[in-house]
Image (cartoon, rainbow, N blue to C red):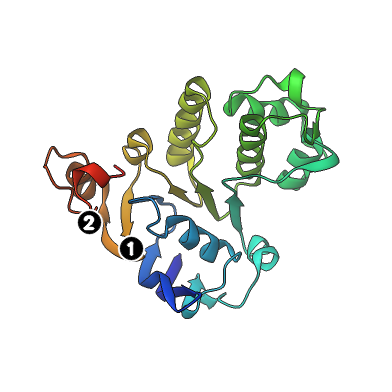
Amino acid sequence: MLELQDISVSVGDNREILDHVTLTVPDASFVVITGPNGGGKSTLAKVIAGIQPPSAGRILLDGEDITGLGIDERAKHGIGFAFQQPVRFKGITVRDLLLLASGRSDLKEEALCSYLRDVGLCPKDYIDREVDASLSGGEIKRIEIAVVLARRTQLTIFDEPEAGIDLWSFNSLIDVFRRLRSEIQGSVLIISHQERILEIADHIVVLSGGKKIADGPREEILPTLLGAEQRCPYCPGGEEACAH
C-alpha cells in the first residue's frame, strides 16, 4: 500500500504546486487521478516515482518511509513509471528494453511480441529496432508503455498514456488496462482526463490548484465529473475552463 502524507511541493517564490495532499493507494487497486490542466497531477506522479522531491510530507510504501529515495531506489522497491515524454536510447533495441524490464533473459519471443501487440505495434516491425530518433513520438510512447507492462511492478504509474496515441492504439490500451485491472496483483495509478479510462477505475482522485478536492470510489466521483451541471464543482473556472 502507498501512502502520501501531507505532501507539498513549492517552487520559486513559495508558489505551491501541491498543497498538503494526503492520499492512499491500496494494494491491487486501479486509481485514476484527474482534474484541470495545471492542477498538479503530473507533479504528484513524479513525487511518487521519486523524480520530484516533496517540499514537505512523507511517502510510505508498505509502511516503509521512502521519501528520501530516488527513482532508481524506488524502482527496486517495485514502483514503475511511464513518462509523458519518453526518453530515447540510441544503440539499444526494443528487444533489449523488454528483456531488461522483464528481468528474464530467457523470455520467449512470443511473450516479448505480446507486449508490443498490446500497445498496437506490429512486433516484426519493432522488436529489433533501435529506440532512437527514427521512432515517432507516438511510437516511442507505446514502446515505453510496453516496457512498463513487461515489468509488472508492485505499483505502476502512467502519466497521460493517451498522449500522442492514435485512436486505434488508444482502444488497444483500454483493453490492456481492462486486462490489468482483472489480472492485477499490484496497483495501477493513471493520470488522465479520458472518460474511458475513468470508467474502468476502482478509485478516482481529483486535483485542482494543487489540492485534493475529491477522492472516492468511481461510482461516487464519476457521475459528478460527467454531469450536465453548468458549473463543474471541480473546476474553479466553470464549464468554459472545465478539463473534464
Determine whether, in the image, residue 191 is placed left or right of residue 215. right
- Asked if the residue at tag 2 contacts the one at tag 1, i.e. Cβ–Cβ closer than 8 Å, the answer is yes
Residue ID for mark 2:
236
Tag 2 or tag 1, which sits nearer the N-term? 1
Label 1, secondary structure: give it: loop
**Residue at the extreme right:** 91
Q: Quadrant of the C terminus?
A: top left
Label 2, secondary structure: give it: loop
Residue 68 falls in image quadrant: bottom right
Q: Is residue 188 above or below residue 198?
A: below
**Callout 1 crowding tier (Cα within 10 Å): few <14, some 14–19, many ≥20:** many
Amino acid type of disc 2? Pro
Amino acid type of disc 1? Gly
Between 181 and 132, which is closer to the camera in this rendering?
132
Q: How many marks?
A: 2
Q: CA distance from mark 1 to mark 2?
A: 9 Å
Q: Is residue 228 above or below residue 156?
A: above
Numbered mark located on residue 100 in the image? none
Task: Find residue 159 and report its horizontal and vertical position in percent.
Answer: 51, 48
**Callout 2 crowding tier (Cα within 10 Å): few <14, some 14–19, many ≥20:** some
Task: Find residue 109 and report its horizontal and vertical position in percent.
Answer: 77, 27
Between 185 and 37, which is closer to the camera in this rendering?
37
- Residue shown at the point (26%, 56%) measured from the top left: 216
Task: Find residue 161 and report its horizontal and vertical position in percent.
Answer: 51, 40
Determine whether, in the image, residue 40 is placed left or right of residue 147. left
Between 238 and 186, which is closer to the camera in this rendering?
238
Q: Is residue 226 above or below residue 203?
A: above
- Residue shown at the point (14%, 47%) measured from the top left: 231
Task: Find residue 46 and report its horizontal and vertical position in percent.
Answer: 54, 61
Numbered mark located on residue 209 in the image? 1
**Residue at the extreme left:** 229
Q: Is residue 222 above or below residue 60?
A: above
